[in-house]
Image (cartoon, rainbow, N blue to C red):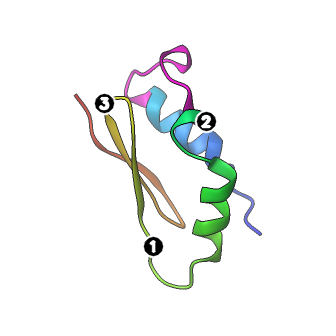
Amino acid sequence: MSDRNLLLEIVTALEEQGLGRDEYQLQRVVDVEALEQLVNSARADLEVKFSVGEFRLCVTQSDVQVLESP
């Protein structure tokens, strides 16, 4: 079990790109609990990529990155 708060990491990454919390509904894009379980249970390097609005994110066991921004 990880101590990280993946939801907070995703929201923070989006806010750092200037996207306000009222500009998207994350629960419509990704099931954060399922994503957290998937990433935490991976035995090898795993990258999960998805889009929130115009932003493309990459989640790994150790990081959340914004890959593309408008």
Determine the CA span between mark 2 and mark 1.
Answer: 21 Å
Q: Is 29 placed above or below 50 here? A: above
Quadrant location of the N terminus in the rendered image: bottom right
Residue 14 place in picture, x, y as percent: 45, 32
Residue pointed to by mark 1: 46
Q: Residues within 10 Å of mark 2 (few under 14, many from 20)?
A: few
Give the camera-side residue of 63 and 68: 68
Label located before the other in sequence (3 or 2) = 2
Q: Which of the two labelled residues, at mark 1 and mark 3, occupies the earlier sequence position?
A: 1
Say whether disc 2 or disc 1 marks the residue closer to the N-terminus. 2
Looking at the rendered structure, the secondary structure element under dot 2 is helix
Q: Which mark is residue 22?
A: none
Q: Judge the density around disc 1: few (<14), some (14-19), many (≥20) Cα neighbours within 10 Å.
A: some
Q: Amino acid at mark 1?
A: Leu
Three-letter amino acid code of the residue under disc 3: Glu
Q: Quadrant of the C terminus?
A: top left
- Where is 14 relative to 6, above or below? above
Q: Is residue 36 above or below residue 43?
A: above
From the viewer's perspective, is the residue at label 3 or at label 2 nearer?
2
* Element type where label 3 sits in the image: loop
CA distance for labels 3 and 2: 16 Å
Number of disc labels: 3
Which residue is at a point 26% across and 34% down the rendered structure image?
A: 69
* Direction left: furthest residue: 70
**What are the residue bounds of the magenta stretch?**
16-26
